[in-house]
Amino acid sequence: MRLKPQHIQPVIMAGVMAFLMTGVVTFINLGLPPDFLVLWARAFVIAWPLAAIAAFVAIPIAQRLTLRIVTRLERSGSNQ
């Protein structure tokens, strides 16, 4: 299988989001203990694959919902 942008983009997006979210949540829950980076890395390694799977599921749904919203907004805007 040849990799395409639609295969890589959700993985990168999920990685960025998992990195930020696990860092913030780890900090909120634990503060800055001496092993903060180890705990953050552990949370990130668990979260990234789950976030990537969620992105592959969520992106098509979000695209369809976005199209519906934009279509309805355009229709209501043309009625005015």
Image (cartoon, grey):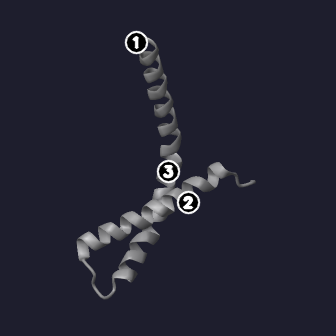
Q: Position of residue 21 (x, y in %)?
A: 37, 63
Res. 55 mark = 3
The residue beneath circle 2 is 12
Who's the residue at 40% across and 65% down the image?
20
Which image quarter: residue 24? bottom left
Q: Amino acid at mark 1?
A: Gln
Q: Earlier in the sequence, mark 3 or mark 1?
A: 3
Task: For marks 2 and 3, give the CA distance.
Answer: 10 Å
* Label 1 CA crowd tier, 10 Å (few <14, some 14–19, many 20+): few
Residue 59 percent across, percent down from the top left: 51, 44
* Disc nearest the viewer among 2 and 1: 1
For badge 2, the amino acid type reads Ile
Instruction: Identify which residue, 59 or 20, lies in the foreground.
Output: 20
Q: Secondary structure at mark 3?
A: helix
Q: Which callout, 2 or 1, points at the residue further toward the start of the chain?
A: 2
Q: Mark 2 or 3, which is nearer the eye?
A: 2
Q: Depth-wise, is mark 3 or mark 1 nearer the camera?
A: 1
Q: CA separation, marks 3 and 1?
A: 37 Å
From the viewer's perspective, is residue 76 above or below residue 27?
above
Q: Quadrant of the C terminus?
A: top left
Q: Which residue, given by chain and number where applicable, does mark 1 sit on?
A: 80
Residue 23 occupies quadrant: bottom left
Q: Identify residue type, mark 3.
A: Ala
